[in-house]
Image (cartoon, grey):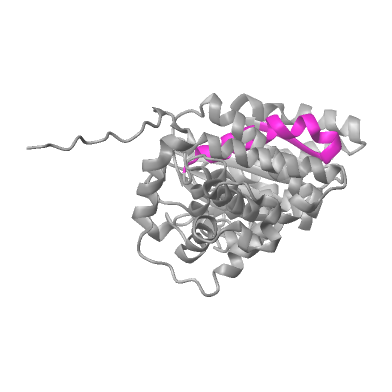
């Protein structure tokens, strides 16, 4: 098996309020349903094994775009919303944070009984992936959350996260079963993180002699520097800065939503009636569902769909969020009835924005965009963990 990537995130304590958790579950289910419907159940596993896509999904859901909390909240929302539809979707999500991770073996055995898959083999894969990241790779991070996601085809992915008290960061590990060869002989495509010196990696292919020695007489330990390929490292600052996003891509989405009217595009006629703010969110959600891997190198950009629970880059616009969910759910329902026009329009939405990028030159009003969102937040039902957004205070003009 190749580990598909990892992400280093600043530790971020706090909670996900009920009003956001419920919306995350609904949007998460709509995203997974769309992917299964258009690309197949195994594509869900590939997406979840991509650290950049996973971070973009968390951002578009309204979580804090860079924090460690994205891992547990996104997987918690997906498990809550997807598992009731597992038989239909062919996707099962096991494990979780803390005590929930210890329930993974029992959950996998139960799934094995209902699907005919080898539950004992799945339990072994779950335990070995955790052992590799927690013990064989001694990088200073101790696992505290473990999610095992599988399809009824027998393929699976793992999303697990460890914490380092020394660096006050969390590290998320992604695994994918598609290229399974060995858990102990160079199983990773890469392991990543900020360089803090030499790291003991007993699974590196160069450690074969040492592994044999350990099996015989617990001989010497090899030390190997770790390769860096698909690595996501996010900054400590909470606010979204211009350098955190691809301004050309973000600018094209904002231009499409707020300046170019949907009626100008034949492909978007079925989306008429949506306000520009909802169209902005829907374009970013469309990209999460249908975009190619290269589109997710700047996860912060997707926070411009539904903001963040701590108010960065702006408060979560609950009215827009609900309308986006409603449009997606309606399109999915119609597709199941054989009426796919609206779903196809949503699919093409991200392509229209992508095409607009070709000749688009971003201006320097990034901060003004955020300021405008915050100023109008109360109109869209803006909420954060600190409360509801309020209209700006009107200054009374002095007569004298």
- Residue at horizontal 62%, vertical 24%? 99
Viewer-side residue, 129 vs 37: 37
Left/right placement of residue 202 relative to residue 167 reads right
Q: Is residue 263 above or below residue 317?
A: below
Q: Quadrant of residue 146?
A: top right
Q: Position of residue 307 (x, y in %)?
A: 47, 43
- Residue at horizontal 43%, vertical 29%? 385
- Residue at horizontal 45%, vertical 71%? 361
- Residue at horizontal 48%, vertical 45%? 65
Left/right placement of residue 253 relative to residue 247 reads right
Question: In the displayed image of the protein, which residue is found farthest to the bottom?
Answer: 359
Q: Position of residue 55 (x, y in %)?
A: 56, 48
Q: Position of residue 285 (x, y in %)?
A: 62, 49
Question: In the displayed image of the protein, which residue is found farthest to the right?
Answer: 116
What's drawn in magenta, residue-wise? 67-95
Q: Is residue 211 above or below residue 310?
A: below
Would you say residue 223 is visible in this rendering? no
Q: Is residue 267 above or below residue 318?
A: below
Secondary structure mostly seen in magenta is helix
């Amino acid at each position: 098996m190749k580990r598909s990537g990892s992400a280093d995130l600043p530790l971020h304590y706090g909670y996900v309020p009920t009003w956001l958790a419920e919306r995350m579950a609904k949007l998460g289910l709509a995203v997974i349903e769309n992917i299964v419907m258009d690309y197949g159940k195994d594509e869900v596993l590939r997406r979840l094994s991509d650290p950049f896509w996973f971070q973009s999904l968390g951002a578009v859901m309204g979580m804090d775009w860079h924090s460690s909390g994205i891992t547990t909240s996104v997987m918690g929302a997906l498990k809550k919303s997807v598992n009731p539809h597992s038989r239909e979707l062919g996707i099962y999500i096991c494990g979780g944070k803390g005590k929930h991770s210890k329930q993974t073996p029992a959950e996998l055995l139960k799934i094995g009984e209902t699907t005919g898959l080898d539950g004992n083999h799945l339990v072994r894969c779950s335990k070995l992936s955790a052992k590799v990241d927690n013990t064989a790779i001694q990088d200073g991070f101790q696992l505290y959350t473990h999610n095992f996601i599988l399809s009824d085809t027998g393929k699976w992915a793992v999303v697990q996260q460890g914490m380092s008290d020394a660096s006050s960061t969390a590290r998320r590990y992604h695994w994918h079963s598609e290229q399974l060869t060995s858990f102990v002989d160079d199983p990773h495509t890469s392991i990543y993180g900020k360089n803090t010196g030499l790291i003991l990696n007993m699974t590196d292919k160069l450690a074969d002699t040492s592994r044999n020695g350990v099996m015989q007489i617990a001989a010497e330990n090899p030390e190997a520097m770790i390769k860096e390929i698909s690595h996501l490292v996010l900054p400590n600052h909470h606010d979204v800065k211009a350098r955190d996003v691809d301004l050309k891509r973000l600018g094209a989405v904002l231009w499409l939503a707020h300046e170019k009217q949907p009626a100008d595009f034949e492909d978007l006629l079925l989306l008429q009636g949506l306000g520009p703010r909802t169209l902005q969110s829907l374009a970013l959600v469309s990209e999460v569902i249908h975009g190619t891997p290269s589109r997710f190198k700047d996860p912060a950009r997707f926070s411009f769909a539904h903001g963040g629970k701590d108010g960065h880059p702006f408060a979560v616009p609950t009215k827009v969020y609900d309308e986006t969910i409603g449009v997606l759910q309606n399109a999915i329902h119609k597709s199941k009835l054989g009426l796919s026009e609206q779903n196809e329009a949503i699919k093409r939405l991200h392509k229209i924005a992508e095409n607009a990028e070709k000749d688009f030159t971003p201006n320097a009003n990034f901060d003004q965009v955020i300021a405008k969102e915050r100023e109008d937040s109360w109109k869209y039902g803006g909420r954060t963990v600190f409360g509801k957004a309020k209209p700006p205070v009107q200054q009374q003009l002095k007569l004298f």
